[in-house]
Amino acid sequence: MRKTRKPGKKSLIYGFIWIVTYLGGLMIFNYAELSKTAGIITALVPALTFALFVYHFIRGIAAMDEVKKRIQFEAVVIGFSLSILLLMALALFGMAIELNYAWWGYKNLVLYFILFYYAGMIISARKYS
């Protein structure tokens, strides 16, 4: 008999793979001198693993009950809204003052977006518990 994984577990596994490849890519770019080809490949690997994560995440949501789907939907909406708010504010602040790109550069924004999603999860889960 073949053991099948739950869709939610698969998305966790692919999410972990994506985070590892993204952080690995950041470290490679920070500490290594790469050719253009190696740089493009290093940038593509996290993008591909993220695409796999999103695919399995959506499949996992499709297998959830209605309340869990609603929690996920609200978490994504909250996270997306906060992400757009951050991008808008940074664009305007960037025109007014010089921003510290060590904190507000593209590579760090991904981490803020993840935090926004989890903030949305906490807010939404509290609402339905």
Image (cartoon, rainbow, N blue to C red):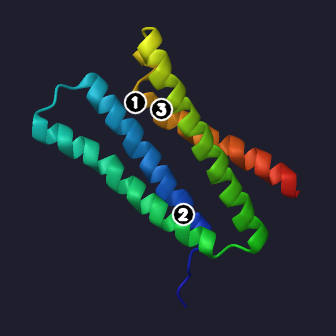
User: Residue 63 vs residue 31: left or right?
Assistant: right
In this figure, which residue is indicated by the disc labeled 3?
Answer: 109
**Measured Cα–Cα span from mark 1 to mark 3:** 5 Å
Amino acid type assigned to the residue bearing label 1 in the image: Tyr
Residue 10 seen:
no
Q: Residue at x 69, y 73 (%)?
A: 64
Residue 89, quarter of picture? top right
Q: Is residue 83 above or below residue 124?
A: above
Q: Where is residue 102 drawn, in percent x and y?
A: 42, 17
Q: CA distance from mark 2 to mark 1?
A: 23 Å
Task: Say what amino acid the circle numbered 3 marks.
Answer: Leu
Q: Please tell me which residue lies in front, 120 or 24.
A: 120
Q: In the rendering, which numbered label is found on residue 93?
A: none
Residue at 11%, 41% in the rendered image: 37
- Judged from the image, the secondary structure of the residue bearing numbered disc 3 is helix
Residue picked out by circle 1: 106
Quadrant for the C terminus, please. Answer: bottom right
* Label 2 Cα neighbours within 10 Å, binned few <14 / some 14-19 / many ≥20: some
Q: Is residue 100 above or below residue 25?
A: above
Quadrant of residue 116 within the rendered picture: top right
Q: Is residue 1 in view from this perspective?
A: yes
Check the picture and name the quadrant holding the N terminus.
bottom right
Q: Which residue is mark 2?
A: 57
Q: Label 3 crowding class (10 Å Cα cut-off): few <14, some 14-19, many 20+?
A: some
Q: Nearer the viewer, residue 24 or 73?
A: 73
Q: Nearer the viewer, mark 2 or mark 1?
A: 1
Q: Is residue 44 left or right of residue 113?
A: left
Query: In what element is the residue under mark 1?
Result: helix
Q: Secondary structure at mark 2?
A: helix
| Residue 108 point in image, percent of width and height | 46, 29
Mark 2 vs 1, N-terminal side: 2
Q: Amino acid at mark 2?
A: Phe
